[in-house]
Image (cartoon, grey):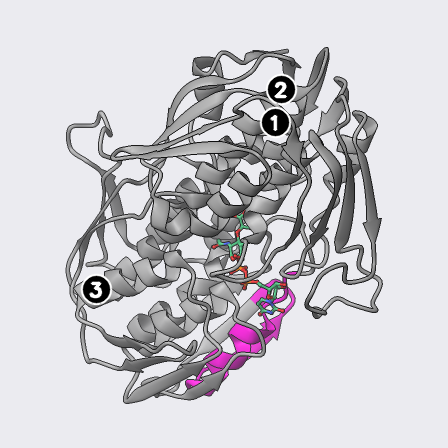
Amino acid sequence: MLEVHGGTPLRGTVRVRGAKNLVSKAMVASLLGDSPSVLRGVPRIRDVEVVTGLLEVHGVTVTSAPDAGYPDGELILDPADVAQGSIVDIDAHAGSSRIPILFCGPLLHRLGQAFIPDLGGCRIGDRPIDFHLDVLRRFGATVDKTPGGIKLEAPQRLRGAKVELPYPSVGTTEQVLLTAVRAEGITELKNAAIEPEIMDLIAVLQKMGAIITVDTDRVIRIEGVDSLSGYVHRALPDRIETGSWASAALATGGEIFVEGANQPDMITFLNVFRKIGGAFEVCETGIRFCHPGGELKSSVLETDVHPGFMTDWQQPLVVALTQASGVSIIHETVYENRFGFTDALNRMGARIQLYRECLGGTPCRFGRQNYQHSAVVSGPTTLHGADIEVPDLRGGFSHLIAALAADGTSRVGGIELINRGYEDFLDKLAGLGARVDMA
Ligand code: EPZ
């Protein structure tokens, strides 16, 4: 349980390292190489531990940089002895992560089989894996659902395929990339996701020897090759963590320099941040975010796949919008159930109403169904301390921001979930002058 004494503007510097949502995939990519890979900028977060455990279960040796101080966040991944892990071990290591699904392609190439336990991940919607299984079948894999998970086999070498995704899913695009690079022949993927983390994964695979073309119309073409080597790569910075600290600066009326933040990946976020009255300065080594004083302005926004406003920025920014004057409208089009965290904000004094209708320019997949996927935030409202239980990774960080912006003391339970994606967040908070104690 964390006791948060709110009302103090956060001021100071935090450093962001490699993006969680690239690092985990680049670690899986190491399975495809004939030689060791070196990944730099790896944050110390729970999701990295989970993927490390899963790789080790499959015979990959994962070591941190020899100087042990981990200053550069360097991991060396050696896939020399890849072997099928036991189902019990895979299950034990998978924890609440969705990453195991991405082991399929590489393991099918290396071993001809793979086993995927029932998947976890943040509870922000149903999060099915139907697209993943469909594309793996298209490459020639057989897929058998068993009570404990899914067993896949490749009776012969996987073959390139023509695939069109029903929705530009990040994970399924990565699935296709990780499978197609060593499949026989050409793969054409239409309606692909083109998030910066995917472009960085393509850079990793190209370093390994893959041939991948990205067209302007969400089409990715991959020419399969017979073998790949290891890579040396520095992960792109975490744009979700950057947006989270930026929102914390705005909600608490403070100023945070996010060392390592990369402007090109933040363009959409920065536009919204500026429109609602936040100020930022792009420096050579990072971005400084602050509340410049005066009123924040309400806004209308819609989450979307890249280059739209990413869903993972939505939750922390909603906390800042509770402090803006007027009515803000947010239409969540990526996940059907990503506003659960607003219950706690309302208990703290926010005025947020949820709607089933699509309150945005584009009707989305969740319209006219029973999903409360639009929110109307009326502000500004004074937030008050409360007892809160963290619901998911981004929602949990958003609750922390709300507690820091609130009058009085909050007791926040379940903060271990936040370790999944925010490195050393308690030390970072202390460094920013937050008054937090473990109770
Ligand atoms: C990735 O999840 C990220 N996770 C998420 O970040 C992020 O929110 C999401 O991409 C969108 O940017 C990782 O990279 C580990 P999707 P992913 O496949 O790949 C539906 C965080 O907090 N869908 O793009 O699982 C799905 O239900 C996390 O860091 C299917 O219907 O997301 C969702 O509505 C949370 N069937 C939509 O597509 C499928 O088989 C987009 O999901 C797959 C997805």
Up/down of 206 relative to 311, above or below: below
The label nearer to you, 2 versus 3, is: 2
Magenta run includes residue 335: no
Kindly identify which numbered label has been placed on residue 251.
1
Q: Is residue 169 visible?
A: yes
Quadrant of the drawing holding the N terminus: top right
Q: Amino acid at mark 2?
A: Leu
| Relative depth, front residue between 272 and 307 | 272
The quarter holding residue 285 reads: top left
- What's under tag 1, amino acid-wise? Ala
Respond yes or no on whether mark 1 lies under 8 Å from ligand 1.
no
Rendered residue at 31%/85% (across/down)? 157
Q: Nearer the viewer, residue 54 or 165?
A: 165
Residue 392 pos. (x, y %): 63, 41
Q: Which residues are magenta?
A: 127-149
Quarter of the image where one finds residue 117: bottom right
The answer for how far apart the CA atoms under marks 1 and 2 are is 8 Å
For image coordinates 58% across by 52% down, the residue present is: 311
From the image, tell me which residue sits under label 2: 404
